């Protein structure tokens, strides 16, 4: 038996072959009047993936998140979570299927202490556990998500536990919002520009935290971010949206060499770093 030698990678690949994807979008379209914000997007997300979504402002990234978390009803197309049809479902059903998200502008309870904000999320986890016993049972909860203080330690806000959420810095509020999403004990975590406005070192810390959520807590993470260079260094797959259309779904290596992606987006976003210069010259 050679399979035990590299159990980690092997097992993940085998599981994803036999288990329905956490989330599938089939030909998903969202229209606002005459505007097609999401235009026939099809994509699948399987357990254990860390996927980035990039694209210019107005490309439809947030609308895509809204649709796959039940916040925005699609105009057409289909959504499946764990193989179940959630196309017309409300947000609480997506949450019950393990989907949690952050919003582009952090939504925290400003008057409540940081710790109480996390406890609020845990209440939802409790509700889900009773209703959906097949996963999310207490036994399967990673130690880092077992209670509010553990979650605060994970996101690095233990020292701020008793402060009102409105009194911590905007970047700490972004971490808190991730903590609130984690408290619902999701399987699929959607992060919408959680690193916007962060300093370079905060950005790197954020990227490292996101990696840990996947590597150590086994979460599937989809991460929208404009800090493309950092994002591409940390994800293994990236979706590129442009005017609502999915123009690439590939490895970072291939995406930065994709002429359509360079034309639509990366040409502007990645012009500065010298290392990209050399790489772009090798484009076939
Ligand atoms: N609720 C809405 N009503 C009307 N138009 C919207 C709404 N939400 C988003 N849009 C439009 O849809 C397009 C995609 O927006 P969005 O998904 O926020 O893009 P991104 O997150 O990639 O910047 C934009 O043109 C935006 O103005
Ligand atoms: Mg957006």
Image: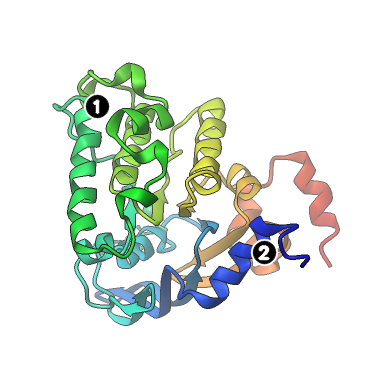
Tell me the quarter of the picture where residue 145 sits: top left
Residue found 55% across the figure and 64% down from its top:
239
- Sequence-wise, which precedes: disc 1 or disc 2? 2
213 over 200 or under it: above or below: below
Q: How is the image coloured?
A: rainbow
Residue 234 image point, x, y percent: 61, 46
Res. 247 visible in picture = no
The extreme left residue here reads 111
Label number found at residue 114: 1
Asked whether 208 or 249 is in front, the reply is 208
Q: Nearer the viewer, residue 33 or 60?
A: 60
Residue 136, horizontal then vertical, whole percent: 32, 56
Q: Which mark is residue 163?
A: none
Taking the view exactly as shown, the residue that stands out farthest to the front is: 1
Residue 22 x, y percent position in the rendering: 42, 68
Density class for disc 2 (Cα within 10 Å; few <14, some 14-19, many ≥20) is few
Q: Name the quadrant of the N terminus.
A: bottom right
Label 2 sits on residue: 10
Whole-number angstrom distance, CA of label 1 to CA of label 2: 40 Å
Taking the image as shown, residue 25 lies to the left or right of residue 183, namely right
Residue 81 placement: quadrant: bottom left
The residue shown at (24%, 49%) is 125
Q: Quadrant of ligand 1?
A: bottom left
Q: Secondary structure at mark 2?
A: helix
């Amino acid at each position: 038996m050679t399979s035990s030698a590299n159990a980690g990678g092997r097992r993940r690949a085998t599981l994803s072959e036999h288990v329905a994807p956490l989330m599938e979008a089939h030909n998903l379209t969202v229209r606002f009047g005459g505007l097609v914000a999401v235009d026939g997007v099809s994509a699948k997300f399987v357990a254990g993936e860390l996927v980035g979504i990039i694209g210019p402002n107005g490309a439809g990234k947030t609308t895509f998140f809204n649709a796959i978390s039940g916040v925005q009803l699609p105009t057409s197309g289909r959504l499946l979570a764990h193989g179940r049809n959630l196309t017309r479902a409300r947000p609480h059903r997506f949450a019950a299927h393990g989907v949690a998200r952050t919003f582009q502008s952090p939504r925290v309870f400003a008057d409540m202490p940081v710790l109480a904000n996390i406890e609020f999320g845990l209440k939802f986890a409790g509700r889900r556990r009773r209703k959906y016993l097949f996963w999310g049972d207490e036994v399967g909860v990673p130690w880092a998500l077992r209670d509010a203080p553990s979650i605060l330690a994970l996101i690095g806000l233990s020292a701020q536990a008793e402060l009102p959420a409105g009194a911590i810095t905007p970047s700490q509020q972004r971490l808190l919002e991730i903590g609130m999403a984690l408290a619902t004990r999701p399987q699929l975590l959607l992060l919408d520009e959680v690193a916007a406005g962060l300093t370079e070192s905060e950005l790197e810390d954020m990227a490292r935290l996101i990696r840990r959520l996947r590597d150590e807590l086994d979460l599937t993470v989809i991460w929208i971010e404009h800090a493309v260079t950092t994002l591409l260094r940390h994800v293994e797959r990236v979706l590129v949206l442009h005017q609502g259309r999915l123009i690439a779904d590939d490895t970072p290596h291939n995406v930065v060499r994709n002429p359509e992606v360079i034309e639509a987006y990366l040409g502007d976003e990645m012009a500065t770093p010298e290392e990209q210069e050399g790489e772009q010259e090798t484009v076939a």
